Each structure stands twice: as structure tokens, then as C-alpha cells.
Amino acid sequence: MVERITRGGLLRRIGGLVALGAGVGAWRSAPAPAVTGVSCILTPEQTEGPYYIAGERLRRNITEGRPGTRLDLHLSVVDASTCRPIEGAVVDIWHADALGVYSGFGAGAASRTFMRGIQKTDRSGLAAFRTVYPGWYQGRTVHIHVKVHVGGNVVHTGQLYFSDTLTDAVYAKSPYNRRPGRTTRNAQDMIYSSGGRQSTLTVSRKGTGYVGAIAMGVRR
């Protein structure tokens, strides 16, 4: 398992891409804004958790046909000192499916690949994924795991979050409404309490799904 390195960052974007403070994680019907920004701050490192599998596939669509509300992720990587985009950074994500199951573990043990994937950032520092809105499981709020590699080194390990208001709206529909009674919201999650607000995605509506965006500043 890769050792966590306690460093990382968050780019505060102009135009509402990442809004630290009370507006973080708001969702709206406007298109996702372009990646812009003028200042960087350190983002909190968070636990890798028990469900990481190294050597995931290089691919954009990680759903493998599993059901759920479509979620496009726009994850940007920038230099925390200069705010310049980093091309060629490797962004590694994994999360539970709509029913709260991780591939490779428990009910998902038959497959080691669904809801897991890697993308390299382009010239603008952007890595894009197509997935579904994650489901919940006992004891944790809704989240996506992320790991960023630059030059073969892990420079950030964290988790990405959603507003509870958005999650409530998504979970009112199928297949999520097959599992009512979500046990943990953001305020009750001990991991979220250590920097989750700064790691909350800004989410925009896209057709029947959503686009979630955030920028992560790293020190090479």
C-alpha cells in the first residue's frame, strides 16, 4: 500500500468552481465553469482507507455499465506554489457503486475494477472521468477517494465530498431509493470533519446527471 504523504493543496477558482466557505458544494443548473484561478492554499490530506487497489486501469469511463445517476468528474491538478496547471499528473480515483459496494471487497469481490480508474492530466491540468454518484455505506458520509501522482511520487491522498442537500435529491431516485435510511451525513463523519469542507466538489447539473469539479494544488 502506498504511503500517504501529508501535503497537497486546493486551487480557489474564480466564477464559483471552488468556493471555500459557506458556498462550498452548492449545486446549480448552470454549466460547469472553466478552470481558472489566482490563489492556492494547502488542502487537507485524508486517509487512503481500506479499499485501495493499486494498478487500476487507464480509462475515463469507470462505470462498467453499473446503474446510477451519471456523474462527470473534472479534477484539476496545479502547482501549489505557482497555481500553474501540471500536465501529465496521474489522478487515481475509486469509490462505492450506487448500492454502496466497492469492487474487490465484500459483495463486490467478483470484480476488482468497477468504479476505479486512472487518468492523466492534459495541458490545462485536467483529468476527466465518467462515473455514477456514489452510494452510501455504514459509518461514512458519501465520498470519492483520490490519489495524485507526479513524477512517480504520491503527492496527494484525499477524499472528495458532496453537499448533503444534493445527496438527498439524488437518493430520492432509483436505484438509490432501494436503500433508504442513510446512516451518516457530513456533520457526523469523523473524516469529513478534518478538512472535508475544503474537499467538497462544486456540482453543476448536466441533463439528468451532474458535473463535479475541484482543483487540487500539489507540491512536486
Image (cartoon, rainbow, N blue to C red):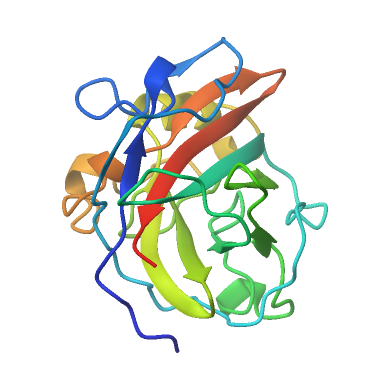
User: Which quadrant would the C terminus be assigned to in this image?
Assistant: bottom left
Residue 49 in the image, given as x and y percentages of width and height: 38, 73
- Front-most of 60 and 64? 60
Q: Quadrant of residue 21?
A: top left
The reply, left or right, for residue 111 in relation to residue 74 is right
> Residue at 40% of width from left, 29% of height from top?
37
Q: Residue furthest right?
A: 65
Q: Residue furthest top?
A: 30
Residue 132 in view here? yes
Q: Compared with residue 85, is residue 145 higher up or lower down, i.e. above or below?
A: below
User: Which quadrant would the N terminus be assigned to in this image?
Assistant: bottom left
The reply, left or right, for residue 168 in relation to residue 60 is left
- Front-most of 110 and 120? 120
Residue 35 in the image, given as x and y percentages of width and height: 52, 30
Q: Compared with residue 196, is residue 12 higher up or lower down, i.e. above or below?
A: above
Residue 178 in view here? no
Q: Quadrant of residue 199?
A: top left
Q: Compared with residue 26, is residue 59 higher up or lower down, i.e. above or below?
A: below
> Residue at 41% of width from left, 49% of height from top?
216
The reply, left or right, for residue 83 in relation to residue 101 is left
> Residue at 25% of width from left, 30% of height from top?
20
Residue 34 in the image, given as x and y percentages of width and height: 56, 24
- Front-most of 112 and 123? 123
> Residue at 56% of width from left, 61% of height from top?
93
Residue 217 in the image, given as x and y percentages of width and height: 37, 51
